[in-house]
Image (spheres, rainbow, N blue to C red):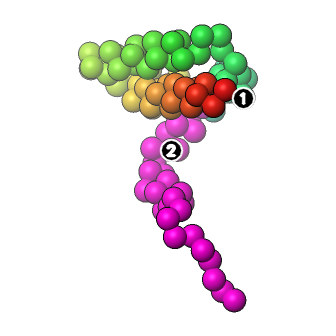
């Protein structure tokens, strides 16, 4: 009684809790995109991996050039960059499963 056999398993809550501010930034960008397009539409964008890589690089170049805030969303380019990198990672992981 009272046993929990979780040795060797990932510390999902403990790890993700350490990124709460960053994850909320991702949620802000995702919400902006969901309101602009659709809630889960990003998953079905044609040639999504390439297009999200391009979007990430555009935001990175803006940041590198000194522009902090995306003029359309009002959110930092860093937030958009991170969201796009996660979208690429997710789509690549899904592609590997197929």
Quadrant housing residue 90: top right
- Residue at image position (45%, 12%) is 54
Query: Can residue 87 be seen at all in this image of the molecule?
Result: no
According to the image, label 1 marks what residue? 39
Residue 32 percent location from the top left of the image? 61, 28
Near-viewer residue (43 or 31): 43
Question: Quick check: is 72 in the magenta stretch?
Answer: no
Quadrant housing residue 62: top left
The quadrant of the rendering that contains the C terminus is top right
- Residue at image position (43%, 20%) is 56
Q: Quick one: label 2 or label 1, which is nearer the N terminus?
A: 2
Near-viewer residue (35 or 88): 88
Residue 11 percent location from the top left of the image? 50, 61
Near-viewer residue (39 or 89): 89
Secondary structure category for the residue under label 2: helix
Near-viewer residue (46 or 82): 46
The vertical placement of 26 against 17, above or below, is above
- For the record, the magenta segment spans 1-30
Mark 2 and 1 residues: CB-CB less than 8 Å, in contact?
no
Residue 5 percent location from the top left of the image? 60, 74
According to the image, label 2 marks what residue? 23
Q: Distance between the residues labelled 2 and 1?
A: 17 Å
Residue 8 percent location from the top left of the image? 50, 65
Question: Quick check: is 8 in the magenta stretch?
Answer: yes
Query: Can residue 70 be seen at all in this image of the molecule?
Result: yes
- Residue at image position (59%, 15%) is 48
Secondary structure category for the residue under label 1: loop
Q: How crowded is mark 2: few (under 14 residues within 10 Å), some or many (20 or more)?
A: some
The quadrant of the rendering that contains the N terminus is bottom right
Q: Residues within 10 Å of mark 1 (few under 14, many from 20)?
A: few
- Residue at image position (58%, 28%) is 96
Q: How many marks?
A: 2
């Amino acid at each position: 009684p009272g046993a929990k056999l979780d040795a060797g398993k990932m510390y999902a809550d403990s790890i993700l809790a350490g990124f709460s501010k960053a994850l909320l930034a991702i949620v802000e960008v995702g919400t902006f995109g969901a309101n602009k397009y659709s809630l889960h539409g990003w998953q079905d964008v044609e040639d999504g991996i390439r297009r999200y890589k391009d979007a990430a690089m555009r935001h990175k170049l803006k940041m590198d050039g000194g522009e902090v805030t995306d003029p359309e969303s009002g959110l930092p380019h860093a937030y958009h960059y991170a969201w796009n990198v996660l979208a690429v990672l997710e789509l690549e992981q899904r592609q590997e499963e197929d």
